Image (spheres, rainbow, N blue to C red):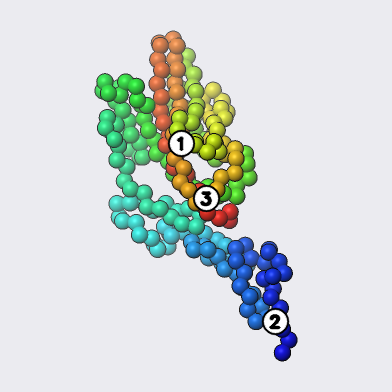
Amino acid sequence: FPADLNECEFSDFLCQHNCANTPGSFYCLCPPGYYVFEDGRSCEDINECDTGNNTCTTEQVCFNFQGGYTCLDPLQCQPPYIEVGDNQCMCSAENPACRDQPFTILYRHMDLSPGRAVPADIFQMQATTRYPGAFYIFQIKSGNDGREFYMRQTSNVSATLVLSRPISGPQEVVLDLEMVTVNNVINFRGSSIIRVTIFVAEHKF
């Protein structure tokens, strides 16, 4: 009998993930959370939130990311903040405890591939209410421990969150993106926060 040719040893590019040799042929394998695509070689994400194959309760929101999913608990605003609608907490100006706190905290979630080419624009932030005489400062207030991100101001009322260095996964990054509103005419300074949770996948596909 002729010796079987191990196709997997001839090329690293036969399969996007792992290659398994069979007599006279080969087949491709994908990591958990992925399925082998129609081409028989690529790995495609399984959306556990769409298929219903997840462990989220009826109170939770299922959030899919590359290679996995997470169950998001209902928003609970920490005092002195109160809930004011869709993923948003507000600190009332009438409440003395709110004097030095951001006026609002808006919660957002997104996924990110570790193979993303850098620099990459990944999130847009802009002032929704514009006051005459005011100017806006955009900055990352917390969470950027690995210095992979920075804010680039794109206009006087908007900025973009930029991924500046390659990032590895799996990991969960929580960034507080702050917009400071300054109005020297009426001696006003206030801020609002977008708290972005970024789920970084383990694999580059």
Among the 4 quarters of the image, the one containing residue 108: top left
The answer to whether residue 120 of the structure is visible from this angle is no
Residue type at tag 1: Gly
Give x and y (percent) for residue 20. Answer: 61, 73
Give x and y (percent) for residue 122. Answer: 54, 40
Identify the residue at the far bottom of this view.
1
Residue tagged 3: 169
Local SS, label 2: loop
State whether residue 40 is above or below residue 113: below
Give x and y (percent) for residue 133. Answer: 47, 14
Q: CA distance from mark 1 to mark 2?
A: 53 Å
The residue lying at 52 percent from left, 54 percent from top is 202
Residue type at tag 3: Gly
* Camera-nearest residue between 14 and 52: 14
Give x and y (percent) for residue 29. Answer: 57, 68
Q: Earlier in the sequence, mark 3 or mark 1?
A: 1
Residue tagged 2: 4
Among the 4 quarters of the image, the one containing residue 28: bottom right
The answer to whether residue 24 of the structure is visible from this angle is yes
The residue lying at 52 percent from left, 38 percent from top is 146
Q: Earlier in the sequence, mark 1 or mark 2?
A: 2
Q: Quadrant of the C terminus?
A: bottom right
Local SS, label 1: loop
Residue type at tag 2: Asp
Residue tagged 1: 143
Local SS, label 3: loop
The residue lying at 27 percent from left, 23 percent from top is 97
Q: Quadrant of the N terminus?
A: bottom right
State whether residue 80 is above or below residue 122: above
Disc 1: CA contacts within 10 A as few (<14), some (14-19) or many (>=20): some
